[in-house]
Image: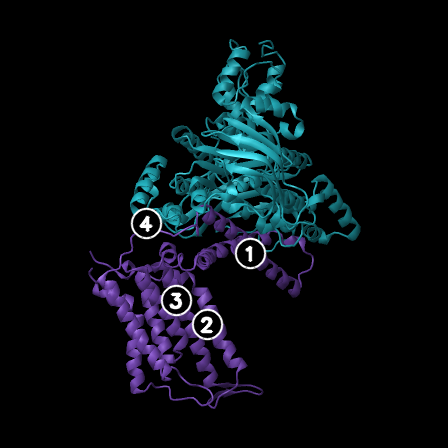
Chain colours: A purple, B cyan
Amino acid sequence: MKRGFRDFHPAVCFVYYAGSLLLLLLMVHPFFTLSALVVLFAVNLLYDAGKRLLQLKSVILMTAGIILIVNPLTSERGAHILWEGMSHRITLEAVLYGGMMAGTVVGVIASFASYQQVISTHQFLYLFSRLLPQWALLTVLSLRFVPLMQRRLEEIMRVQRSREGEMSNFHFREQLRRRMKRLEVLLTWSLEDGLQTADSMKARGYGAGRRSSYIPYRWRLSDGVSLFFLMATAGLCLFGWVQGMGVLTIYPIMESLMPTDQEWMLLAGYLSFFSFPILVEMGGMNA
Amino acid sequence: MNVLDCMGFTFTYAGTNTPVLQDLSFSVAPGEMILLCGPSGCGKTTLLRMMKKELQPAGRQAGEIRYKGISIKKLPDIRAASEIGMVFQHPEHQIVMEEVLQELVFGMENVGFPPDQMRRRLAETISSLGLEMLLTRRTESLSGGQKQLLNLASIMALRPRLLLLDEPTGFLDPIGAVQFLQTIKRLNEETGITVIFTEHRLEEAYPLADRVLVMDGGSLLYDGSPRDGIEWMNRAGSRHRHLVPTIPRLALQTGVKSDFLPLTVKEGRQWLKEHGKTASAPTDPPEETVSVPPNPILSLNRIDFRYDPETEVLKQTTFQVSPGECLAIFGANGSGKSTVLQMMANSLQPDSGSIRYKGKKRKKRKDNQWHHQIGYLPQNPEAFFLRETVEAELDAVASRFSKEEKRDRCQEVITHFKLLSLLTRHPHDLSGGEMQKVALACLLLRDPEVLLLDEPTKGMDPELKRFLSQEIQAFIQKGRTVVMTTHDVEFAAVTATRCTLLFDGDVLTPAPASSFFRKNDFFTTAVYRVTRDTGMPEAVTVEEAVRLWQSPDWLSVSS
C-alpha cells in the first residue's frame, strides 16, 4: 500500500509543522522566505488543490497588503532611497523589510492551512491530551472557532442590515462604533457556543483519566527515518542561523542581497525540510 | 436499588440569594422514563446539570443527590462520565471532531477503553442506531437530526445507565424530532436504560413518559403518572394548564366526563369513537377559495437565488402577502425558508426577479422606508442584539422618536411584554424564549407595517407561545401583515391565516390554514389526525372542534 505524508505517525507530521513555523519566523531573508512560500503553496495544492488557500485569499491579501504599504510609509530608515517626496522618503530597506514580514505572515497562514488538512483533531488530541489536557482542549476549541466565526459574522451583518432604519444619524463615527459592536457581539456569542462544546467534552469524560486511542498509531521504521531527516535538516538550518546565516541584515547597514556560498548550502537544507511532504508523496514511501 | 435519589436538595447559584432549586425530593427506579416539565426558567436545566458531576454549576448546595446510593459529588470521575450520559439542546455545539467515526469514539477514548473493546462497542452502537451510512462522513455535512443522533450514539457507546436529555429536539424539524424521541423510547424499552428528559414538544414527548415531574419556581409540584398529571395540570391554574398537550386538551375541553384520557392520536380516535355519534354522515370540508389577494403589500416575483454556483436555493419563487394576514411558510431545514425572509427584509438581494412593497419595486440596497416599516426577527436572536442590557436595546430602537413619545412607547412595551424583570440583564444571558420575546418587543416598538418572523416559537414554552399567538393576531387585526417560517404545526394552525410549503426552491400556492391542514396526512395537526374520517365534523384546532361539536350536540355527555 502506498503511504503518504498523512499516514505518518502524528508526531512526525507535527514536528514538520512546528519546524516550519520556527524556520519561517527565524530565517528572515527574501530568498529563504520566498522559496518557502512557493513550497508551502505547492504543499497546499497537493492536499486540497488549494481550496483552503482560496478561501483565505482575502485575509492573505489584506494582511500582506497592509504590511507592504504601511511599513515603507512609516519607516524612513535606510540609505538606499527609492523615492523622495516633500516630507517623506521611501527607502529600499523599508520596502524589503515590509516584504519579508509580509512573506513570513503569508507563509505562516499557508502552513496553518495545510496543517488543518493533514493533522486531524483526533491526532492532535492523541499527541497532547495526556501531556497538556487543558491546553489541548483550548486549542481544539479555538481551531473550531475560525469557520464558525466567519459564518456568524455574515449572519450578524445580514441581521443588522435589517435594523439600519432605526438610526436617524449616519455619522461616520456612529457607523464605526456599530461595526465595533458587531465584533463584540460576535465574540460573546461565539464564546458561549464554545462553552457548550467544552461542556459536552467534559460530560464525556475528557480529562477524567488516561486517554486511549481507537486508531493505533504505530511507530514504524519509516517514521523514524522521516523524523531523523526532518531533525537533521532543521538542525542544519538552526546551526546556520546561530552563525548568523539565512537572515538578511538590513539595519543599520544592509548586507548584500545575494547569499554567500555557505548560505546557498543552507538554503538547500531549508528547502528539503519544507518540501518533505512533496518528497514523500512523489517517492511514495513504502512501509 | 434506585438509580437516583434526590433528598431534600436545595441549590443557590453563587452570588445570588434566592435558591433556584428548593427542597426537591424524589427517587428514580431503574428503567423509568421520566419527563421533567414546567414553564421556562423553572429550574429543569439546573436540576439536570446537578445530576451530572462534571457540569454541576458553582453555588451552595443543601441536601443530596445520590446515584445508586453514592453522592454524585463523590462518584469517581470515570464512572460519572461513562454511567451518566447527557445530550444537550444544540446538535452542532456538542460535536468536537471532524469525522463521524472519531466523534463516536471520543468518549470511549477519554475514559480509556482498550481498542478491542472500542471496536465492539462501536459496532454495536452504530448498528443499533442505524448510523452505518454515516460512519465515514464529515460531521459538518450532517443534518441537524443526524447530528443529534450522533451525539446520542457517542454517549450510548459508553454504555451509560442513566441518560439525561435537555430539550434534545429544540433545534430539530418535526420529522427529526419524532425520530429522535422514538429512538430514545426504543433504547429505554430494549436496554432498560433510565431516562430523564425535558421537552417543549409535549405533543410527542408526553405519551412516551412513564412518569411526569412538574416543576415551577424551583419546587417540585407534581410527581406521578402522565394521565393523572394532565388532570393535575388542568386543575392547577392557568400557568400549568398551558402545558396540557393538544389531544388530552381536546378531550378535556369538550366537557365530556370520561375515566380514560387519551394521550396519543390512536387513543384520541378511540375516545372519539366511544363518545361521538359515529353514525352521522361526514360533513363537507369548507370549500377552498383560491383568490389572489386584492392589494398585496409585499410581493415577490420570480426570485432566483443561490449562495454558491452549485446549489440553487430559490427557483422562480413567486408569492404575495396582503394586509391583515399571517402567512406561515413550512419546509424542511435547509429548504430556503430563512433565505426567503432575509430577501424580504432586504438583507439579501435576489440574483434575479423583483420584490415590491406597496406596489413599489425595491431598487436600493439601503431603503429607509423599507427598514422603518418592515421588522425582521432572525432565527438566532443573538445576532439581533448589540447592547449590554435589554433596556439599552429598547432605548436604541426608539431613538428616532421624540423624548416624550419614546418614554411612553417603551413603557407600554415593557408592561405589555412583562419585561420589567429583564431590563437590566444582558440580552445574551436570557433563555431562548425570553430572547425571542425581547427581540419581538424591539420590533413592535418601531411600529412596523410588516413583521417577518423566522421560527418565532423556537425555545418558547407553551405559555409564551400562546402569548405570541395572541400578539400576532392582534397585530394583523390592525390590518398589518406577518410572514413567518415555522416547524410548529399546532402553532401555525391557531395563528396563521394562510399556509404554504417551500419545497425544491419554490413556494406552493398559499392556501387558507384550515384547508391547508385538511389536505395533509402527516404534516398536519394532532386534532385533525384524531378527527379525520371519524364521521364527526373534522377540525384542525381544539377550539374549532369544540365549536363544531357543540351546536348540534355531537358528543354524548354521559359515559
* Residue A64 tag number: 2
Q: Which of the marked residues, 1 or 4, is nearer the chain's N terminus?
A: 1
**What residue type is disc 1 on?**
Leu
Q: Mark 3 points at which residue?
A: A110
Q: Which of the marked residues, 3 or 2, is nearer the chain's N terminus?
A: 2
Pointer 2 chain:
A
Q: Looking at the image, do the residues carrying marks 3 and 2 touch, with CB atoms under 8 Å apart?
A: no
Pick whichever, B276 or B296, lies toward us. Answer: B276
Q: Mark 4 points at which residue?
A: A214
Pick whichever, B184 or B359, lies toward us. Answer: B184
Image coordinates of residue A46 in percent, x first then y, are 30, 63
Q: Which of the marked residues, 1 or 3, is nearer the chain's N terminus?
A: 3
How many angstroms separate mark 1 from mark 3 (CA)?
Answer: 25 Å
Q: Which of the marked residues, 2 or 1, is nearer the chain's N terminus?
A: 2
Q: Looking at the image, do the residues carrying marks 1 and 4 touch, with CB atoms under 8 Å apart?
A: no
How many angstroms separate mark 2 from mark 1 (CA)?
Answer: 25 Å
**What residue type is disc 2 on?**
Ala
Marks 1, 3 in one chain: yes
How many angstroms separate mark 1 from mark 4 (CA)?
Answer: 36 Å
Q: Nearer the viewer, mark 1 or mark 4?
A: 4
Image coordinates of residue A20 in percent, x first then y, are 36, 70
Marks 4, 2 in one chain: yes
